[in-house]
Image: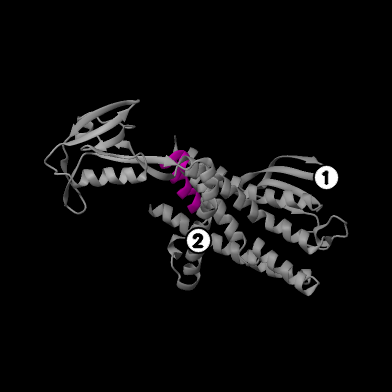
Amino acid sequence: MSKLLYILIAIVMLGFIVTVHEFGHYLVGRLCGIGIVEFSVGFGPKLFGFRRKDIDYSLRLIPLGGYCAFVGEDGENPAPNAMNNQPVWKRFLTVAAGPAMNFVLAFAFCTILLSNFIIAEYLPRIDLVYPDTPAAACGIETGDVVTAVNGTPVSFDEVGMESARQIIQSCDPLQPIELSIERDGQARTLQVTPAAVTDEASGQASYQIGIAFGGRTYRFGEALGRSCGYMVEFTGEMLKALRDLVFHGSGVNDMMGPVGIISFVSDQISSEKLYAVVNLIFFLSLNVGIMNLLPLPALDGGRLVFLIVEGIRRKPVPPEKEGLIHAVGMCLLMMLILFITYKDVLRLIAG
């Protein structure tokens, strides 16, 4: 598969994540009775569009985002269904729905990730037999279940896996190890003598038989329960990284704009295929949700701050002042993105 195709997949992935974000605004806005001018997948020149129930739907050239434009979103509009005429709680829910939908998407893909790719429990089942090793020579195969080592029974759980590993490591390296295995429902006994393997990095030699134990992924119910904790852990790491960036400048050189992200994502997909797609949609969607909740002008978090202030004061911040703050914030954000993109391009040129 060519590099160009991986880049296209990366672009579509990012566009999908942002479109889901905008769909959150769209869905809750409609449920709250707020008028919608247009819902667009992508931005830039229009490729295709249609109108239904006074809403324009469009597909645009650049698939890196999208938008949902509401009636009266950025100014005064006398229409009853205009956003500016809605109560604070309806506007708050509509604005918050974008990041919330990113969290929903992240949760869904986290569940897929845990139930299909992440090891929940290691078992004494052989997941890999390295070529040109004693294990390969004596006939051990992937999928074999170790039931005993040198006559010591091994339970089929993580305790059993660890027990088998420790027994193998503690055996006399010059003596053959007796492995009792189960393959296709049949019991077998194999003799394998460890061989000395030198670590290239440290130069130290150790005796190994050449196997790696595997395990099982999370069951669907387990994955559902574990996904929340998994997301909380990642959120904590992201917030810590953001704090270190703001207060200590840590990770400045690792910041990536759209070009860098697309390059990184395409490289990951080319090497890890489906796992990378699932993992990156989870990670990036969670990232988009968190970043959009930051209380910064031009982001959803900044708009939510103004709505909270309005709710406390019982009157809105003057639209011209709020609009100016968001405009300045958007300009600064675009300047930052352009600067990071410039660094992305230099990084790609430098290899």
Q: Nearer the viewer, residue 157 or 86?
A: 157
> Which is the main secondary structure of the residues drawn in magenta?
helix
- Residue at (45, 39) in percent of width and height: 273
Work out whether residue 53 or residue 59 is closer to the camera in this orientation and state it.
53
Q: Which region shows up in magenta?
A: 260-275
* For residue 89, side relative to residue 102 (left or right): right
In the rendered image, which residue does mark 2 sit on?
238
Q: Is residue 191 above or below residue 119?
A: above
155 vs 246, left or right, is left
Residue type of the residue flagged with mark 2: Met
- Residue 132 visible? The answer is no
Q: Is residue 137 left or right of residue 129?
A: left
* Mark number, residue 330: none
- Image quadrant where one finds the N terminus: top left
Q: Residue 232 location in percent, x, y?
A: 53, 58
**The disc labelled 1 sits on which kind of residue?**
Asp
Q: Position of residue 157 (x, y in %)?
A: 37, 42
Above or below residue 253? Residue 134 is above
Say which residue label 1 marks: 54
331 in the magenta segment = no
Q: State the residue at coordinates (42%, 52%).
A: 348
Q: Position of residue 338 (x, y in %)?
A: 55, 60
Q: Residues within 10 Å of mark 1 (few under 14, many from 20)?
A: few
Question: Pointer 2: residues within 10 angstroms few (<14), some, or many (20+)?
Answer: some
Question: Residue 83 at x, y = what percent?
Answer: 80, 58
CA distance for labels 1 and 2: 40 Å
